[in-house]
């Protein structure tokens, strides 16, 4: 019986080595943070996944806009737009600071590829813009503003910002 178990174990180990041989760039399992869900965007022509709030309690909507953007909304506290080109962050910062109606308060995050700011019309509101290079493609990701509802709070915006910052590329497995 001992010989049989040893032989079986050796066979299993060898077959594992053989089945894995020749594969490169294997994808690690992508695990969403607590309360989030992995949304695979490969079926929309994007080579990445993004984390969105758990979609059990809130409705998920993914819309491909005619102008090329991919809008992702989950419930009333998550709405981002992904564009297939980098945004001019310096120009946007200038526009934000010079806005006469939506008065700039401060940058919460100010990095070369990302800004997250507070502004105010009648009450504080928060927005973000981020550039991400995924594979060979440049993307800009920003919150979607809805003039028909209350602006997103700081916590909701932070969740969207973190989601955009933690996009994970989906690597295609290649065989040798």
Image (spheres, grey):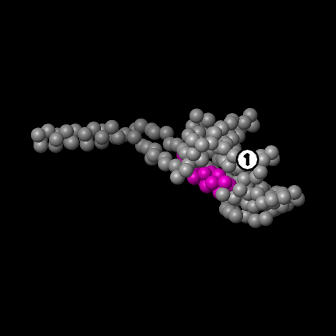
Q: Count the numbered circles shown.
A: 1
Apparent side of residue 150 relative to residue 50 in the rendered image (left or right): right
Question: Residue 86, how many percent across, how many down?
Answer: 69, 49
State which region is magenta: 156-169
Q: Residue at x 49, y 48 (%)?
A: 31
Q: Residue at x 76, y 57 (%)?
A: 125
- Circle 1 packing at 10 Å, graded few (<14), some (14-19), many (20+), is some
Outermost front residue: 57
Question: Residue 146, how many percent across, how many down?
Answer: 77, 46
Secondary structure at numbered mark 1: loop
Of helix, strand and loop, which mostly describes the magenta segment?
helix
Can you see residue 85?
no
Magenta-span inclusion, residue 49: no
Which of the image's four quarters has the C terminus? Answer: top left
Question: Residue 142, how many percent across, how many down?
Answer: 70, 50
Can you see residue 127?
yes
Task: Pick the residue in front: 104 or 27.
Answer: 104
Outermost right residue: 100
Q: Residue at x 50, y 42 (%)?
A: 171
Q: Dividing the picture into quarters, in which one does residue 122 lie? A: bottom right
Q: Residue at x 62, y 51 (%)?
A: 164
Task: Pick the residue in front: 55 or 144.
Answer: 55
Q: Dividing the picture into quarters, in which one does residue 46 lie? A: top right
Q: Which residue is mark 1?
A: 144
Question: Residue 27, how many percent across, how many down?
Answer: 46, 44
Apparent side of residue 57 relative to residue 5 in the rendered image (left or right): right
Apparent side of residue 38 relative to residue 15 in the rendered image (left or right): right
Which of the image's four quarters has the N terminus? Answer: top left
Task: Pick the residue in front: 76 or 162.
Answer: 76
């Amino acid at each position: 019986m001992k010989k049989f178990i040893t032989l079986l174990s050796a066979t299993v180990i060898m077959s594992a080595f053989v089945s894995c041989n020749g594969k490169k760039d294997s994808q690690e399992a992508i695990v969403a943070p607590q309360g989030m869900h992995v949304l695979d965007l490969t079926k929309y022509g994007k080579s990445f996944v993004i984390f969105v709030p758990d979609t059990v309690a809130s409705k998920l909507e993914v819309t491909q806009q005619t102008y090329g953007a991919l809008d992702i909304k989950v419930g009333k506290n998550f709405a981002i737009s992904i564009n297939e080109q980098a945004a001019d962050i310096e120009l946007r910062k200038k526009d934000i600071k010079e806005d006469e109606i939506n008065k700039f308060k401060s940058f919460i995050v100010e990095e070369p590829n990302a800004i997250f700011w507070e502004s105010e019309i009648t009450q504080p509101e928060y927005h973000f813009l981020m550039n991400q290079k995924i594979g060979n493609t440049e993307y800009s990701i920003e919150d979607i503003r809805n003039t028909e509802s209350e602006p997103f709070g700081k916590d909701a915006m932070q969740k969207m910002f973190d989601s955009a910052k933690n996009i994970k590329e989906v690597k295609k497995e290649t065989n040798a």
